[in-house]
Amino acid sequence: MDLWFSEFHTPHVKLAIKVDKQLYSGKSDFQQIDVFESPEFGRFLTLDGYMMLTQKDEFIYHEMLVHVPMCVHPDVRKVLVIGAGDGGVVRELTRYETIEHIDVVEIDEEVVKVAKEYLPFTACGFDDPRVQCHFEDGLKYVRHHENEYDLILVDSTDPFGPGEGLFTKEFYGNCYTALKEDGIMVNQNESPFYANDARAMQRAHKRIHTNFPICRVYQAHIPTYPSGHWLFGFASKKYHPVRDMHAADWKELGIDTKYYNTNLHRGAFALPNYVQKLLEAMEELPNNDTTNTLGGEKA
Amino acid sequence: MEKDFLKRQSRAPIAEALEDYTSERVVPFDVPGHKHGRGNPELTAFLGERTMTLDVNSMKPLDNLCHPVSVIKEAEELAAEAFGAKAAFFMVGGTTSSVQAMVFTVAARGDKIIVPRNVHRSVIYAMVLCGAIPVYVDPGAHEQLGIALGMQLSDVEKAILENPDAKAVFVNNPTYYGICSDVRGIVKLAHSHGMQVIVDEAHGTHLSFSDNLPVSAMEAGADMAAVSMHKSGGSLTQSAFLLVGGEESGENKAPAISPAYVRQIINLTQTTSGSYLFLSSLDLSRKRLALHGKELFDKVIEMAEYAREEINSIGGYYAIGSELIDGKAISDFDKTKLVIHTLPVGLAGIEVYDLLRDEYDIQMEFGDFGNCLAYLSVGDRVREIERLVGALSEIRRHFGKAPLVSLPNSYIAPSVVLSPQEAFYADTEHVEFNSSVGRISAESIMCYPPGIPVLAPGEKITEEVLEYLRFAQEKGCQITGAEDSSLRTIRVVK
């Protein structure tokens, strides 16, 4: 049998993955949810036909979303996770004993149910007693919270469909309000490579930039996402993502990671010139900050 | 009966005829000249091949809008049934064309129509065309919100008794802001005096499809209604219905409207090349509302109520609701309307309107001095409501200031000397604003808030009018319609 999952990355490019079988297919109130089993990537989850995670490369995304801010903020106790119905982000967070409480806000309860049944390798995070799930609109949830969180992680789908509200200026502004005075927000920031993704990336950066005093972007290599080159946004009220990192303290925690390390943390903020240009075009003032270069940072 | 109704209403004769037509691959040696889009590739790429294929003209299987005998006739009968009307007409010139047809039907040159002063300009323009004369009723204004309200029954009665020769009473149901007059009461009153009732239901398409909303014109026994299907009903912009109704009661002394006469009236001004895109959009939208209108609009109401609750909990903003109903100038409130009073946040409605668009990519329907208005309809989803609420709370945080107070609004009873038509075509001249007392205005001057005209063409300029305009201008009201917006000069009838 020649069964393939394919996804258009642009109207002229598509990624295809050989599928052994489809494990789940269902339609929730919000989206089409599918889980497949594949020889190359193991199990993978798609929403409305878009790749969300594969068993083989999910560690890259989840580690980079979580450990970068955790290495910067010295005392994270209360975390808000928006989206992330697969549980991968929560799994990484629960590795920190100092975290006291994790609120997960996922609009689609079905995604969590499906993950618990078919994606135990990420959904295991939900078993931790510190985790509390809220099944509602993320934009609504943050609006009702003020000065409460040390860290907000936005693990959204793409800026169309149910995740659209999580790419808006009002959402980022409400996140700013929900954070404590030294809080950090990290978001999945799309890709700089293909034109449509790059525009979404620029819009998100612009909107975050107008809301937060510190707003930097870092990158990771995720094979199953369009172009494989993926960006994350680091927005913060106080801490600089590189100058304020606590590399030695983090190493002492002894968290065993597959992708993340503190050298890579520094390097991830060093962006290709074309990406820097795309970002700078969105920042009102010329970018004199040297954050996105390797020079002059403390170890 | 219910089952038969659903079976009938699940048809869409015009859309079905178009489907048949396209599948027959007819060779077009008729207009339009783009011939299914082939003659205009750029436009076809822009609008889509399907759209161009459906853009056809009257022909035997597709009927003729000027004299419907087959599929348009059937579609109009279905629309009439869906809206509880005696007859329905498909209109392709916007609801303005429906309003014009209503005015032309009930009044000839020199005939009077009793209208609320906050009537839409299309009604006055229709009077310019046919020579009817308006008799105005003060709709009252809400002091805090600064919006015009509805006609009170007692004021309508006074106007009727003072003008027993008037032909009809004109009612907004509801206003832009969702305010309803007592349409049932007005219909009974007018009919008992032999006057017809025509209703601007541009903002009330949905009223016919839910038990949880104010009464519709047809249900109230009104003689005609102009319904903007494209506003809350989901059809294409510029498409509308004109409905003919009436009250079956011994008390009704008003002449019944003849649909055949209405057809003649419509044909005076309507295009003979009515767009089948508009007609099919009306047909399919009517089908959708007839089959699913109740659940659709109940959902819209639910969303609006939710939005009100959330917006009112932000603090400062006041999203108005049914609590305003006072049984007088606010006889009922259309709960699908989301009107947000912004002055307590220190921002004018129009400022919030601009901020939402410029900073948050949210386009509101309308903003005036004290309020902005979100138009909710069959196409809305809760997630967009969340964006609106989120953005409003951000606007308050970033831009909020000390509360603003409402601007003054008082009603000045107009003195109509010439009909709008006579004033429109009269020889005019510009005179100093301050020395214009006693002259007849050739201009229409409106003051926001509350959006009620202070002067209309044909009305006498009084000392009171000048004083009010000076005062309103000084207080920062927006004066619109005047040729010289500084109000140094004014155009008057020679």
Image (tube, coloured by chain):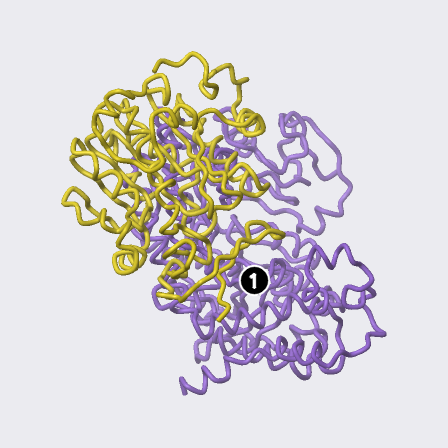
Chain colours: A yellow, B purple
- Residue found 21% across the figure and 28% down from its top: A253
Residue located farthest toward the right when viewing the structure as drawn: B29
Q: Secondary structure at mark 1?
A: loop
Q: Is residue B394 left or right of residue A96?
A: right
Identity of the amino acid at label 1? Answer: Ala
- Residue found 60% across the figure and 51% down from its top: A13
Above/below status of B408 relative to B229? above
Q: Quadrant of residue B492?
A: top right
Q: Position of residue B269 (x, y in %)?
A: 73, 64
Above/below status of B352 relative to B208? above
Q: Position of residue B441 (x, y in %)?
A: 66, 39
Pick the front one: B275 or A231: A231
Pick the front one: A98 or B311: A98
Above/below status of B131 relative to B476? below
- Residue found 31% across the figure and 30% down from its top: A177
Task: Answer whether residue A70 is visible to the viewer in this image.
Answer: yes
Pick the front one: A263 or A168: A263
Q: Position of residue B95 (x, y in %)?
A: 60, 60
- Residue found 68% across the figure and 34% down from its top: B483
Residue bearing the label numbered 1: B166
Q: Is residue B374 left or right of residue B276?
A: left
Q: Is residue B318 left or right of residue B26?
A: left
